[in-house]
Amino acid sequence: MHSPIQFIAMNTRDIPEMPPERNNALRAAADYGIDVSQLVYLLTLTPLERLIQHDRALELVLAARQAGIRHYGFDPRLPEASERL
Amino acid sequence: MASTLDCLKLLSAYDVEHVVVGGVASVLHGSQLVAEDVEICAPLTIANLEKILGSLRGRNPRFRMSPDRPPLPDDPSQLVGFKNLYLATDLGQIDILSEITGVGNYSEVCKHTIAVHLGGVSCRVLDLDNLIQAKSALDSPKNRHTVLELKAIRERIQDKKPSK
């Protein structure tokens, strides 16, 4: 398991040099705005470690959503919410 | 407490015949997306539905797409004929699909799986090529994003393989 500092360091490290004739898919993903360094990091983990990390992120998403509902008094993701915001 | 891992362990413990597909399969292959629902492809036969119901007993399974969210019946025969089951449970959302767009029905999906070991449990997961095919068939912004990620992952994996 990585410490938060290690994790941040991995997230912010430079994307490896990509020669133009190769890495077309990596380049397309990076051009789209996908954090390729995070993908590269995730590939160093086992599937179990990826799933554990995913579940932590999911917990955070669900907690943030509940906080939003508490703040607004309704679910701001619902289609009718745009009229109330 | 959301735990995809617990959900997958539970399905395995009850010997539910299934293949992990969708967002969780993408995560297992290395995608950074957060999947809110566990999507599996499974045969909706009486025998398998019995196992599915057994695994969800006591976990408050309900039909998620119905406005009043009725509970799942205890009798598996009442679920025969459904093509997909979109469920809300105390473990999180579980989608049980009898076929996968871009790949085919359960028996076809079974031909394109890899075994993934998750802390004492072995799961069958849709392989990367077919996951890309399935996600490409569902043309939405979220799936386009995932396809780009999965293609980058495939390229990275191929790049790391020793050349012959």
Image (spheres, coloured by chain):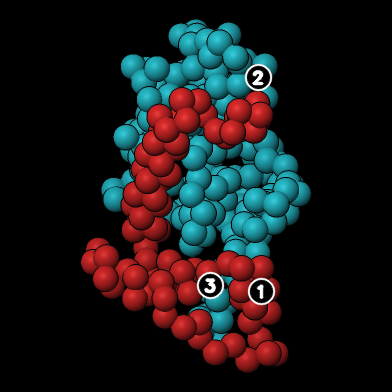
In this view, B102 is above or below B46: below
In this view, A50 is above or below B96: below
Quickly name the residue at label 1. A31
> Foreground residue, B8 or A59?
A59
Residue B19's mark? Answer: none
Question: Distance between the Cα atoms at labels 3 and 1?
Answer: 10 Å
Residue B82's mark? Answer: 2
Alpha-carbon neighbours of circle 2 within 10 Å: few (<14), some, or many (≥20)?
A: few
Q: Chain of mark 1?
A: A
Question: Distance between the Cα atoms at labels 3 and 2?
Answer: 40 Å
For the C terminus of chain B, the quadrant is bottom right
Q: Position of residue B56 (x, y in %)?
A: 40, 22
Query: Label 3 amino acid?
Result: Val
Snapshot quadrant of residue A81: top right
Chain painted in cyan in the figure: B
Residue A36's mark? Answer: 3
